[in-house]
Image (cartoon, grey):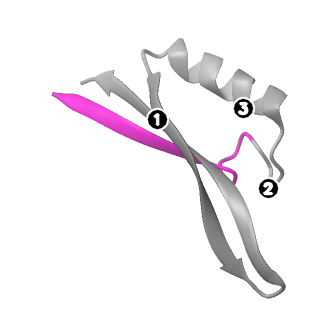
Amino acid sequence: MKEYKVLTQKDKWFGGKFDPEKLEQAINAYASQGWRVISCATAQIPGFGGNREEMIVILERDK
């Protein structure tokens, strides 16, 4: 059985702003708990001033 986690820019690691170094720290922290990245993508999120892109990372580990 597998367990999944979704990281987005709204995750506590980013504080609302995308930073590749913070993403690396987050992935390494989750990796130490047995998580591994299985996919990533960007999504367009509608907003007041138009759309914004958000990074989404999907992690997986054995339960």
Residue receiving disc 3: 23
Amino acid carrying label 2: it is Gly
> What secondary structure is marked by label 2?
loop
- Few, some or many residues within 10 Å of mark 1 (<14, 14–19, 20+): few
CA gap between label 2 and label 3 equals 12 Å
Residue at 66% x, 28% y: name it: 26
- Tell me residue 5's x, y (percent): 43, 40
Residue 29 falls left or right of residue 22 = left
Q: Which residue is label 2 attached to?
A: 16
In this view, the residue in front, 12 or 58, is 58
- Whether residue 10 is visible, yes or no, is no
**What is the quadrant of residue 10 in the picture?**
bottom right
Q: Position of residue 54 (x, y in %)?
A: 68, 57
Of label 2 and label 3, which has the lower sequence position?
A: 2
Return the residue at label 1: 39
Q: Which of marks 1 and 2 is nearer the N terminus?
A: 2
- Residue 7 placement (x, y as % from top left): 56, 43
In the rendered view of the protein, which quadrant contains the C terminus? Answer: top left
**Is residue 56 in view from this perspective?**
yes
- Measured in 3D between alpha carbons, the distance from the residue under mark 3 to the one under mark 1, in whole angstroms, is 14 Å
Counting other residues with Cα less than 10 Å from the Cα at mark 3, is it few (<14), some (14-19), or many (20 or more)?
some
Mark 3 secondary-structure assignment: helix
- Region of the chain picked out in magenta, as a range: 1-13
Q: Where is residue 13 in the image (x, y as percent from the top left)?
A: 72, 39
Number of labels in the image equals 3
The type of residue carrying mark 1 is Ser
**Residue for point 63% across, 67% down:** 44
